[in-house]
Image (cartoon, rainbow, N blue to C red):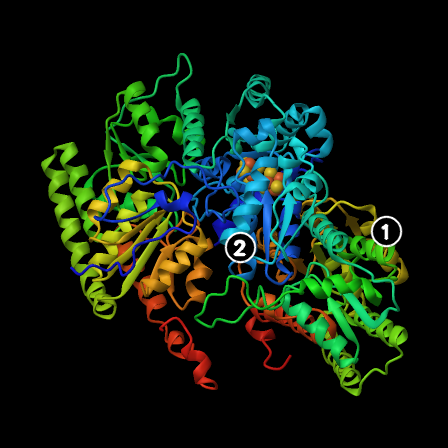
């Protein structure tokens, strides 16, 4: 394929040069672990945010944010995780720290808050998140949680997600994993029965994705023990040690937890990917093989054949419209980036730009091998960089998160939401069709044909097509 | 559907237990968001968040969700070092980098809980920073453990005056300053239109029109061509009068302008509703000796006509209102004009002035059986509604849980609105804003009536 990179990618500040590479041209490792530069308009979120997105779908737990009000308001039900049971997780609890608490410490207030919440709601668990301010004034949330647990005989679990320790969400994923381990490790004398079922790590039930995959697995004859954490309950999570396999979907957030589950409970893990029809089929086959059961394998093949046949005409229709269009991807982690690359390729599209907020060096290496020579890869890009490449690369559609949406559309570039706050089911066979439709409607909306105002053609000619 | 509702019901405590500390389902957010929004109302300004990246990302995201527009803001990107040694070095580097990379005319720095807790002295740090010729750096302190996003907005407005406004000591110009408060860009446009119709020259700041409602041109403007110009804000010190719209968001800046530059200020309500719009026009008329043009008279008459045509749809119906204090105060006044019964009125922002003003308005029409609370949260509201319901809910997107659980229609007004579109462009201020509110309120109630009516009661003409 032709070299799609028309310009040498150039960073805007020399210090950022190491964060942008062109695939194939440079084997230099991308500096993705760099802290974002002071003064840059970074798209990065915080440690607390990372922890919260992982734990939030635990539906019957109270999620109490120990900090000033904002940290809680911004995370109030922003994730599209659906629940089949409790809606407790969709409420926003904050200790609403005031100046007094900052000066004298907020531990007492936190303790009272927990007491009142227990009295009101009797939740099976309370996750207590620490924020930057709580961390900085040195509140010992671990001690407060321990006392509260004993006092109320309920799980009060500290999530040590003080944000400033790193600008990186991955640290938050880890804090969440710690909290989950604390929750699921059986108390002395409690025995969790082993079953044939599997756990599904890194599945958040966005747009009902967990339910969809669960349907496939049931048809194959395999059951989900519990998902981490989509549509999960505290009681279900406690049964996690009883699984015989861990599926791991989002390596960024769940890899470490999978490792620990293997060490502690001897549960092996398997990476899966349900984004895109091909990926879904491949993952289902691997799961079937793990169980090494003729019946499961047979049913899996029937399922795949039927579903593939069902969606193929649709995919073909969209592909006709989309073939040759140019796409950019800027998402949270490399796992997702890889999945989207495959899907867009299945639709006949060309990938000209890829970037992530929190990729790891190996993942970038992976990405750059997967892509065509010259495709631009960026780490923690600022909007000016994204804008520059979108224009230079004449991108038709971009996959990204909420902060990229407007940037793309203002430039006349279509946009698909592929982050954790999306509302569409994009997993499995149905998801492949949904994804194709989303890409199609935004890339080919009739509105793009009307952008140029007919009144003043000279001015309009100055637009980005020059 | 039904299952969903039952589940939601379960999520509120069975009996009302007061929560004495903390917030459950807050009706406010933190100061820096307001400061960021105010800063976006300055032409070619980059808001800068002095703290860790996470906060900044959240504030931008929340604004983006409401306005469906790109919100640019930079961050000092605190790491552990800053929390130990202070953030001075981060801020100085930031300022240098920002002018180099993003080239704004002005940087508006606000603090976050983090830099406030560290105790960074921003005035001093800014004085020590390298600022290129012709560029400006201003700041406001915005600790979120006090007040709310409205306090932050007010603090940034004050910061704008404190750094920029100047009086050259000569005779004041025949011109009005308007501080429009935390409103949508469409509202600012409408306020400007009214002032122009009155034939009065004005400086409006902060002015987010043209920034957060910019057209799509397929050209990306890092700094869209909107917002108050720095030189105009400077010159506001030479205006004859300041009208501050909404006491919570705008009074602090107006009083500083009076103190610093001798520009007298008149505090007004946000011009939402008939009375408040009348008051704005009256103030301009009296101060500048201008006549009210026929066009505005016609608009006012249309509002009255519409109110009479529709009053039987809503008069006497009960309503719960929540949102930011200035919006809720003015809105309550209009609901009273409409003859509705605002039974529960809350704001998340602390401040006893809110309760006092609302009670005064209620007393005037003889309403006593209402509940009013500042520094409240949406659980408070839901528990009241559970005790005794209302016909209509008016407030932000966050009210949709109550609307669903209690089966009460919701009219979306205020900030934030994350689940509907076009609202940033559609004014609720002025006479046109009155028409929009009447339309929304009566249509919502009529939709409801259609939905609930039996076949026998189903009417074509309402
Ligand atoms: S730490 Fe403070 S400034 Fe940051 S999001 Fe939380 S409340 Fe807002
Ligand atoms: S204070 Fe810390 S935890 Fe809260 S939003 Fe800011 S970076 Fe995140």
Q: Looking at the image, in which quadrant does ligand 2 appear?
A: top right
Mark 1 sits near ligand 1, with its Cβ under 8 Å away: no
x and y, in percent, of residue B175 in the image: 81, 72
Separation of marks 1 and 2 at Cα, in angstroms: 38 Å
Where on the picture, by quarter, is residue B429?
bottom right
Could you tell whether A76 is left or right of B353 in the image? left
Where residue A72 is drawn, which disc sits there?
Answer: none
Q: Which of A389 and B418 lies nearest the eye of the viewer?
A: A389
Identify whether A152 is placed above or below A299.
Answer: above
x and y, in percent, of residue B104 in the image: 57, 57
Q: Residue at x 45, y 69 (%)?
A: B219
Count of labels shown?
A: 2
Q: Residue at x 86, y 74 (%)?
A: B282
x and y, in percent, of residue B7 in the image: 52, 45
Q: Considering the numbered disc 1 on the image, is that residue within a helix, a strand or a loop? A: helix
Q: Residue at x 72, y 54 (%)?
A: B160
Label 2 environment density (alpha carbons within 10 Å; few <14, some 14–19, many ≥20): many
Q: Is residue B51 visible?
A: no
Q: Chain of mark 2?
A: B
Q: Residue at x 78, y 55 (%)?
A: B253
Q: Which residue is the site of mark 2?
A: B72
Q: Which residue is the site of mark 1?
A: B356
């Amino acid at each position: 394929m032709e070299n799609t990179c028309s310009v040498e990618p150039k960073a805007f500040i020399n210090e950022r040069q190491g964060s942008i590479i062109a695939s194939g041209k440079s084997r230099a490792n991308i500096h993705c672990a760099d802290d974002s530069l002071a003064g840059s308009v970074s798209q990065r979120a915080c440690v607390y945010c990372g922890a919260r997105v992982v734990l939030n779908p635990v539906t019957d737990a109270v999620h109490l944010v120990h900090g000033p009000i904002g940290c809680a308001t911004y995370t109030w039900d922003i994730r599209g995780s659906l629940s089949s049971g409790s809606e407790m997780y969709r409420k926003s609890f904050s200790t609403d720290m005031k100046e007094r608490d900052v000066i004298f410490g907020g531990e007492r207030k936190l303790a009272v808050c927990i007491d009142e919440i227990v009295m009101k709601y009797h939740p099976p668990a309370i996750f207590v998140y620490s924020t930057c301010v709580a961390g900085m004034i040195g509140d010992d949330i671990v001690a407060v949680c321990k006392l509260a647990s004993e006092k109320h005989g309920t799980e009060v679990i500290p999530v040590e997600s003080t944000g400033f320790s790193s600008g990186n969400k991955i640290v938050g994923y880890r804090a969440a994993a710690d909290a989950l381990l604390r929750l699921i490790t059986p108390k002395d004398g409690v025995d969790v029965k082993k079953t044939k079922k599997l756990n599904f790590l890194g599945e958040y039930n966005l747009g009902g994705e967990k339910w969809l995959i669960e349907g496939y697995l049931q048809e194959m004859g395999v059951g989900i023990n519990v998902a981490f954490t989509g549509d999960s309950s505290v009681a279900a999570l406690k049964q996690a040690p009883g699984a015989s396999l861990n599926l791991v979907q989002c390596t960024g957030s769940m890899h470490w937890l999978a490792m620990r589950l293997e060490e502690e409970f001897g549960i092996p893990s398997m990476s899966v990917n349900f984004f895109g029809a091909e990926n879904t089929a491949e993952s289902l086959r691997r799961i079937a093989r793990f169980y090494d059961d003729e019946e499961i394998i047979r049913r899996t093949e029937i399922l795949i054949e039927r579903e593939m046949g069902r969606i193929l005409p649709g995919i073909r229709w969209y592909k006709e419209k989309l073939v040759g269009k140019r796409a950019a991807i800027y998402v949270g982690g490399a796992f997702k980036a890889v999945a989207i690359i495959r899907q867009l390729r299945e639709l006949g599209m060309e990938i000209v730009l890829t970037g992530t907020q929190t990729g790891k060096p190996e993942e970038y290496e992976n990405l750059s091998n997967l892509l065509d020579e010259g495709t631009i890869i960026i780490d923690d890009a600022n909007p000016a960089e994204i804008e520059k490449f979108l224009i230079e690369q004449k991108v038709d559609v971009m996959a990204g998160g909420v902060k990229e949406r407007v940037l793309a559309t203002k430039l006349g570039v279509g946009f698909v939401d592929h982050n954790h706050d999306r509302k569409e089911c994009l997993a499995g066979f149905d998801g492949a069709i949904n994804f194709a439709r989303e890409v199609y409607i935004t890339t080919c909306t009739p509105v793009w044909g009307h952008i140029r105002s007919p009144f003043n053609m000279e001015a309009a000619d100055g637009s980005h097509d020059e | 559907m039904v299952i969903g509702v039952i589940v939601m019901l379960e999520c509120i405590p069975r009996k009302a237990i007061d929560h004495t500390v903390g917030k459950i389902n807050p009706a406010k957010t933190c100061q820096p968001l307001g400061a960021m929004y105010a800063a976006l109302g300055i032409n070619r300004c980059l808001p800068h968040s002095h703290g860790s990246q996470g906060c900044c990302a959240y504030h931008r995201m929340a604004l983006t969700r409401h306005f469906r527009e790109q919100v640019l803001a930079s961050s000092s990107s605190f790491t552990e070092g800053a929390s130990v040694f202070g953030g001075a070095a981060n801020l100085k580097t930031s300022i240098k980098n920002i002018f180099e990379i993003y080239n704004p005319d002005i940087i508006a720095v606000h603090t976050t809980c983090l830099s406030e807790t560290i105790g960074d002295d921003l005035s001093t740090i800014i004085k020590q920073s390298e600022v290129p010729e012709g560029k400006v750096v201003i700041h406001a302190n915005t600790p979120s453990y006090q007040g709310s996003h409205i306090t932050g907005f007010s603090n940034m407005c004050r910061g704008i005056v404190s750094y920029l406004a100047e009086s050259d000591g000569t005779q004041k110009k025949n011109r009005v300053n308007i501080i429009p408060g935390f409103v949508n860009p469409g509202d600012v446009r409408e306020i400007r239109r009214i002032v122009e119709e009155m034939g009065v020259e004005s400086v409006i700041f902060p002015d987010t029109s043209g920034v957060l409602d910019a057209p799509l041109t397929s050209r990306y403007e890092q700094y869209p061509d909107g917002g108050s110009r720095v030189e105009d804000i400077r010159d506001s010190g030479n205006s004859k009068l300041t009208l501050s719209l909404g006491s919570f968001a705008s009074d602090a800046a107006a009083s500083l302008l009076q103190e610093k530059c001798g520009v007298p200020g008149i505090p007004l309500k946000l011009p939402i509703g008939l009375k408040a719009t009348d008051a704005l026009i009256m103030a301009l008329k009296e101060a500048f000796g201008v006549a009210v043009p026929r066009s505005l008279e016609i608009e006012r008459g249309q509002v009255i006509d519409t109110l009479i045509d529709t009053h039987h749809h809503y008069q006497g119906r009960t309503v719960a209102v929540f949102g930011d204090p200035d919006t809720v105060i003015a809105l309550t006044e209009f609901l009273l004009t409409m003859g509705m019964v605002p039974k529960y009125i809350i704001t998340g922002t602390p401040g006893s002035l809110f309760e006092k003003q609302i009670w005064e308005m209620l007393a005037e029409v003889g309403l006593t059986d209402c509940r009013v609370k500042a520094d409240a949260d949406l659980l408070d509201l839901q528990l009241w509604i559970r005790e005794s319901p209302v016909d209509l809910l008016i407030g932000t997107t966050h009210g949709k849980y109550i609307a669903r659980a209690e089966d009460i229609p919701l009219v979306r007004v205020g900030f934030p609105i994350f689940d509907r579109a076009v609202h940033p462009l559609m004014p609720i201020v002025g006479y046109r804003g009155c028409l929009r509110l009447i339309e929304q309120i009566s249509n919502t109630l009529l939709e409801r009536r259609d939905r609930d009516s039996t076949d026998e009661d189903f009417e074509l003409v309402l």
